[in-house]
Amino acid sequence: MDEFLARLRAAVRRNTAAAELEQPVIETDSFTVDLAGKKVIKDGAEVHLTPTEWGMLEMLARNRGKLVGRGELLKEVWGPAYATETHYLRVYLAQLRRKLEDDPSHPKHLLTESGMGYRFEA
């Protein structure tokens, strides 16, 4: 089963990489995400993100407009052993919102779907 999941993740990464070539830069009204350059620009300055914050943002941005389940996000960013550690998501998403959203308490781009997961809206 682990091998199957690894192959499935690899296929998704390959498919996502092809989609990235179409639009490696995602612009919102608050910030710009450069997937190819692995950086975020807000107000003309590069925003420092930790590797974990970047991993979350990258996965959400690559799936923009789509719901990304909590378990899926945890497995991709932290690994399969952390699939039930949902408190990590709340902490890191709050950090991302503080760094990127104009009003972190009323986010427009990094959205929570209660009990289900998260969504990135450009």
Image: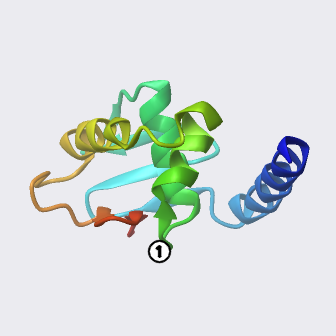
Q: Position of residue 14 (x, y in %)?
A: 83, 55
Q: Position of residue 33 (x, y in %)?
A: 46, 50
Between residues 38 and 64, which one lies in front from this camera angle?
Answer: 64
Q: Residue at x 48, y 36 (%)?
A: 54
Q: Is residue 12 left or right of residue 121?
A: right
Q: Position of residue 51 (x, y in %)?
A: 50, 26
Q: Residue at x 58, y 59 (%)?
A: 62
Q: For the view shown, which residue lies furthest in the bottom direction?
A: 65
Q: Quadrant of residue 40?
A: top left
Amino acid type, residue under disc 1 in the picture: Gly
Location of mark 1 (residue) = 65
Q: Is residue 77 left or right of residue 86?
A: right
How many numbered discs sit on the rendered protein?
A: 1
Mark 1, residues whose alpha carbon is within 10 Å: few (<14), some, or many (≥20)?
A: some
Q: Position of residue 81 (x, y in %)?
A: 60, 31
Between residues 7 and 27, which one lies in front from this camera angle?
Answer: 7
Q: Is residue 44 left or right of residue 74?
A: left
Q: Secondary structure under badge 1?
A: loop
Q: Residue at x 73, y 59 (%)?
A: 16
Q: Residue at x 86, y 56 (%)?
A: 11
Q: Quadrant of residue 46?
A: top left
Is 61 rendered above or below residue 65?
above
Is 77 rendered above or below residue 33?
above
Which quadrant: the C terminus?
bottom left
Q: Is residue 34 left or right of residue 106?
A: right
Is 46 rendered above or below residue 33?
above
